[in-house]
Image (cartoon, coloured by chain):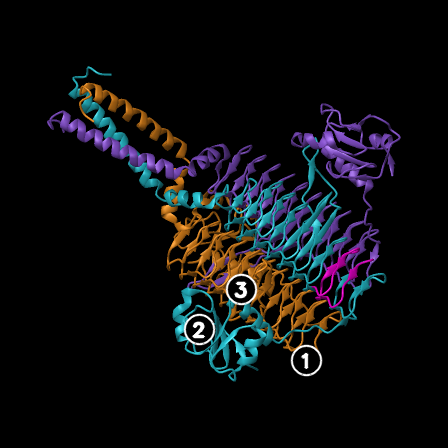
Chain colours: A purple, B cyan, C orange
Amino acid sequence: MIKLGDLAERLSCRLEGDGDIEIKRVAPLDGATTGDITFFANPKYLSLLTQTRASAVILRPDAPDPPCAALRAENPYLAFARALRLFIPTLQPVPGVHEFSEVAANAKLGKDVSVGAFVVIGEGSCVGDRTTIGPNTTIGPGVVIGNDCLIHSNVAVRESVTIGDRVVVQNGAIIGSDGYGFVRRDDGTHEKIPQVAKVFIEDDVELGANTTVDRPSLGETRIKAGTKIDNLVQIGHGVTIGHNVLMAAQVGIAGSTTIGDDVMFGGQVGVGGHLKIGDSSVAVGQSGVTHSIDSNSEVAGYPAIESKEWRRAVTIFRRLPELKRRIEELESKLEKLRSRTDSSSGGTLK
Amino acid sequence: MIKLGDLAERLSCRLEGDGDIEIKRVAPLDGATTGDITFFANPKYLSLLTQTRASAVILRPDAPDPPCAALRAENPYLAFARALRLFIPTLQPVPGVHEFSEVAANAKLGKDVSVGAFVVIGEGSCVGDRTTIGPNTTIGPGVVIGNDCLIHSNVAVRESVTIGDRVVVQNGAIIGSDGYGFVRRDDGTHEKIPQVAKVFIEDDVELGANTTVDRPSLGETRIKAGTKIDNLVQIGHGVTIGHNVLMAAQVGIAGSTTIGDDVMFGGQVGVGGHLKIGDSSVAVGQSGVTHSIDSNSEVAGYPAIESKEWRRAVTIFRRLPELKRRIEELESKLEKLRSRTDSSSGGTLK
Amino acid sequence: MIKLGDLAERLSCRLEGDGDIEIKRVAPLDGATTGDITFFANPKYLSLLTQTRASAVILRPDAPDPPCAALRAENPYLAFARALRLFIPTLQPVPGVHEFSEVAANAKLGKDVSVGAFVVIGEGSCVGDRTTIGPNTTIGPGVVIGNDCLIHSNVAVRESVTIGDRVVVQNGAIIGSDGYGFVRRDDGTHEKIPQVAKVFIEDDVELGANTTVDRPSLGETRIKAGTKIDNLVQIGHGVTIGHNVLMAAQVGIAGSTTIGDDVMFGGQVGVGGHLKIGDSSVAVGQSGVTHSIDSNSEVAGYPAIESKEWRRAVTIFRRLPELKRRIEELESKLEKLRSRTDSSSGGTLK
């Protein structure tokens, strides 16, 4: 329980109403009740705001007055995220190495590391301070993991992967699996190109559940600081992803592609190999990017084109049967007109 | 070995032929031989029926006579499924908790539970009667799992997830991973919104291999009773899925979307966030659903439109080069006709 | 360290330059320096070749002379792959069965098998000589694995799966999960069809990270020798995949489809159920294959059509707004012309 006045202070919000109200929980606009704080950021939900039964609402300075106390914030969604953090019962894992784990004798564990049951930490690996490694996770030899990371259960981090600080890896993610590299032999069979180079996951990256990040044969695969990747995403070998990139679920990036900073990809986007995707560009969900993209562009469709152009074209796509009919009509009308003109002119003109 | 007469009775089928025939196996139409029972449901395979060497066939009352004994059933495919169950050697896991597992002291296990090697069951979790948990599976703290469930190996069920009765979770599936929720800070970096709310998997649900189901920050993620989900599917945070829904492999549902009962999605369908998908609606494989959909509708394409409309448009799509040529021809003919008309009329008309 | 002359011999290349040069490493064209060997195969990177600081380059007999020593090879990429193998520190796993593993008493392990920590090998399974099984991997009962396989960590191989020789399974892959087979009951619920038949992974196959291969109810699922499958791919139940097939990441193949030899699928391709895909055919990334395909064809789009045809159509697709405008212009011009003709002919013609 936190008094609303204290909450305002801790979230750096302007208080409107009684600072002594006791807040017990964070709840959604339509589910909130007495003792709850909620938030309003999307004007679409204005009717929910006017009807909310919450004790307080976090909202913009210019938003309408709610029927309860208010905390005014420039970024209500951010204030909400922080409020949530104050109220959740944090699952603090107990520091220590579980007795049923297998940590190599020469692995180095920092202070207050938590290693779950059935975890393997390979030869020469290092795990930073306060990092947690969930049960049934396998950390290969030669791995470096920074401080304050949370590696969930059933993850595989392969040999020689380097992970920065405050990285979160959701369950089942695979980091450092072999890139898909084969050379065709004369007899039509394929020879594996050894995939032996490194993977770097920089600070503050998050990788989603069952996402896979491949290692290359040469060079490196790198995901730069602050990038957040959703579930079931495929990052090919030799890919470089910039800072603060957002990738929704099931995106696939083929090998050797370079993605700039602040890029955003919707779900199920596919990006070809050996491309350059400029900073701050956006690809709409399910787009198939087959060419390099300039910075600040937004693309859609397959092959992906400028999304404005794509939107105009796709609107007409569904009217194709109508367009075809109009062409047929034009053809028949023109033919009729021509034969009429021919007969009108006595057939003397060709 | 079961006598055909007994089989007819156990499957509630009408017997045509010798009830004393001994059936040893269920086999496909074209691979069946003496001692086998097979089934015929798809008229496409009629020629295989007439040539089958099976000892008996399960088929509709109105299907042609096979060259062997017959079991007539209204739903031959269902009768086949049940026949299969009678003949398979069921892999009954031995009840008991494997000595190399880590079950929290305050976890509650029902009767005849089977817990495999290297399984973790967290603090305060409950597992119902006759439920099986495969090796290398991690069950977080505060999890409730019902009776008669089959959780295969290498699965992760995160904290506070609730699973009903008779649920099947295929290998590698992840339930309760953090939803993809971040707020942009002023400096362009992103702050994680704590994902701390619950996930409910109701009775008789099946989740495919390596499928991921995210938890939200508020509210809940819920998959209702009887829904069957294939492999590598992504269920975003705060999604609600109705009863008896079918989703083929690699489908992705973005956050906060609500899906009605009896919906069917083909493989690789993507559905945007915050949408409502009506009961009994269908999305054809690879569709990209960007708007809410009414009940009983069938959609296709990206953006998904009524599938009839899409089919008509797509047929014309491949003829676009021809349509373009016809437009060009029209333009040139019209131009010719106009200049002819102009000269014919002595150029007096404009 | 290997002398260039020795390297030429071991890679069967023609040496141009000083055979006594000492090579320490394989590096990319633009990152190579003294002591490195690199390779040049793609004419696009000619400028990198002329500027390389490598000590030697592997390249075609007809490629330009590099500014350093050269190894000439018909297939430089293959020679490069083999050079890489000579220089990498091979992570030879120590043969032996880890003390924290659970191998059934009646399982048979070949010579020099390596079984990692927290591995389960079920009743009656056989593992061939020199095969390695990574930590936290679960091998079901009745599984047969050949010689010289590398099964990485956190993999699940379900009951009765058969795996050939020299197979590589990347982390998190699932082999033999239940096919997605349900029959609708009269009340709208679905009954599971027991998925109890076998899966065969033949020699020299590679399966990517978190890829899933389902077992069918009858018949078999089979991936033939030499096929290489990337990450997060879904292989449905009863699918047969030919020899030396290449499938990029996130491809999905629905049940009972048969794929010929030497087929190539780009990333995120979807293939419907019960289809036949001819030998040596190609589907471009993100294609949706809804019909059977002849041998040697290349398809693209959704529904997938001949890729040449698709490319022509898609070029025009983005010009649809222009085509529509041209149709509208034609209509207005034609109308104008008609009314003019009408008035010109004194309105006597209809």
Residue for point 55% across, 40% down: B290
Residue for point 51% across, 71% down: C219
* Mark 2, secondary structure of its residue: loop
Same chain assignment for discs 3 and 2: no
Q: Are marks 3 and 2 in contact (CB under 8 Å)?
A: no
| Horizontal side, residue B139 vs residue C6: left or right | right
Q: Are marks 2 and 1 in contact (CB under 8 Å)?
A: no
Query: Relative to the observer, which residue lies in front, B103 or C285?
Result: B103
Give the magenta-colored segment's residue range.
B123-149
| Crowd tier of the residue under label 2, counting other residues whose Cα lies within 10 Å: few below 14, some 14–19, many 20 or above | some
Q: Position of residue C64 (x, y in %)?
A: 41, 48
* Mark 1, secondary structure of its residue: loop
Q: What whole-number distance in Å separates the C-alpha atoms at marks 3 and 2?
A: 17 Å
Write down the quadrant of residue B185 in the picture: top right
Q: Are marks 3 and 1 in contact (CB under 8 Å)?
A: no
Q: Position of residue C34 (x, y in %)?
A: 57, 50
A292 lies above or below B7? above
As shown in the figure, which amino acid type bears the numbered disc 3? His
Look at the image and say whether residue B198 sits in the magenta stretch: no
Q: What whole-number distance in Å separates the C-alpha atoms at marks 2 and 1?
A: 36 Å
B205 lies above or below C333? below
B267 lies above or below A59? below
| Residue identifier under label 1 | C106
Subunit that carries the residue with mark 1: C
Image depth: mark 3 or mark 2 in front: 2
N-terminal-most mark, 3 or 1? 1
| Residue identifier under label 2 | B30
Query: Relative to the observer, which residue lies in front, A246 or A6?
Result: A6
| Residue identifier under label 3 | C237
Look at the image and say whether residue B138 sits in the magenta stretch: yes
